[in-house]
Amino acid sequence: MAYSVVTPKPGGSDVLEVREIDVPAPGPGEVLLRHTAIGVNYIDTYFRTGLYPWPVEADLVLGAEAAGVIEALGAGVDDYAVGDRVAYVSANGAYASHRTIAASQLVRLPDNVPDETAAGCMVKGLTARYLLHDSFKVEPDHNVLFHAAAGGVGQIAGQWLAAMGVHAIGTAGGPEKCALALQHGYAHVIDYRSEDFVEKTRELVPDGVEVVYDAVGKDTYPGSLHCLKMHGTMVSFGQASGVAADFKLADLAAGSFHVTRPILFHFTALPGWLDRASNELFSLIGEGTIKVDVNQSFDLRDAGRAHDALEGRQTTGSTVLIP
């Protein structure tokens, strides 16, 4: 039976509904995918709650990344074949056993990258890629502060930074998560539950860091700015604790700071970026430089439980749904 998990209207995790669907037929330039693993990300909760605007009035199918097998080809698709293993990132639509999608959005999976790994790293790994190379170009002599270092993006970014020879400081909540972050490339990890991360960062780097990567939002602002060196950059790429509503442009005058709020899909829309970035990511995974920890797995029908765990900060690494 083909089915999808639908969000009829914005709300809590309890609004998610499982609905049977007909297996769709691919149109021109599209393929039909049978999903084998689907990634769960904070952006899914942002859409579910209505924090991000919906592209439809009702019955939104969440999900920004997945891996699967091609089961049918639409007219004009010549680069893929039935049976190919592929993965993708997309604004929504992944919480389903089957879906159609434009072939131009796909990337082919190497044999040494399992489906669950791909589904757990497309959004997080490509996010890490644009954070470290595009939103702010990190150099080996830089000092970096990365919040939520034990999370999915944080773990991949820590390993990537270590491979680049960058001195990276992470923050995490509690001894277990701090220990986990230290295992993923960070030179130091600050427990924000028992330490003042601004004071500790300034102890480690008295002049401040070149860049702070912040997906926490309300709870870490304006502290993130206070960790920056003169002319430093804050990259805000999420708001797990809520929006930093008290942000003012005048705050940047304290150190001639820079701030940017990037979105993954603005990078995947650039010609050639998706292929280059995914090939680089898969190469690092394949050679063992980056290990993707898929630490939670839920049945697709239990997507609400997965959201509860994510929003309750009860997860580490990546979380996937299995149809």
Image (cartoon, helix red, strand yellow):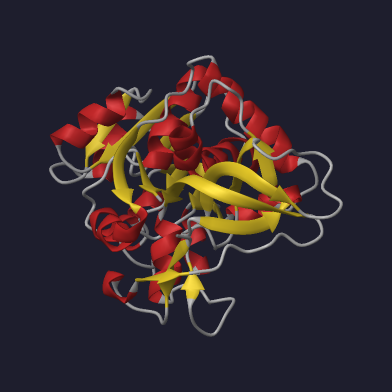
Vertical relation: 99 (above or below) 11: above
The x and y percentages for residue 249 are 52, 67
The x and y percentages for residue 64 are 52, 55
Q: Identify the image quadrant of residue 301.
A: bottom left
The x and y percentages for residue 69 are 59, 41
The residue lying furthest to the bottom in this view is 57
**Count of numbered tags:** 0
Viewer-side residue, 273 vs 148: 273
Left or right, 288 with reference to 272: left
Q: Residue at x 78, y 41 (%)?
A: 272
Vertical relation: 291 (above or below) 77: above
The residue lying furthest to the top in this view is 287
Left or right, 85 with reference to 299: right
Residue 164 seen by the camera: no
Vertical relation: 321 (above or below) 145: below
Vertical relation: 169 (above or below) 73: above
The x and y percentages for residue 81 are 74, 38
Q: Residue at x 38, y 66 (%)?
A: 244
Left or right, 3 with reference to 259: left
Viewer-side residue, 41 vs 9: 9
Residue 122 seen by the camera: yes
Q: Residue at x 65, y 41 (%)?
A: 134
The residue lying furthest to the front in this view is 1
Q: Identify the image quadrant of residue 179.
A: top left
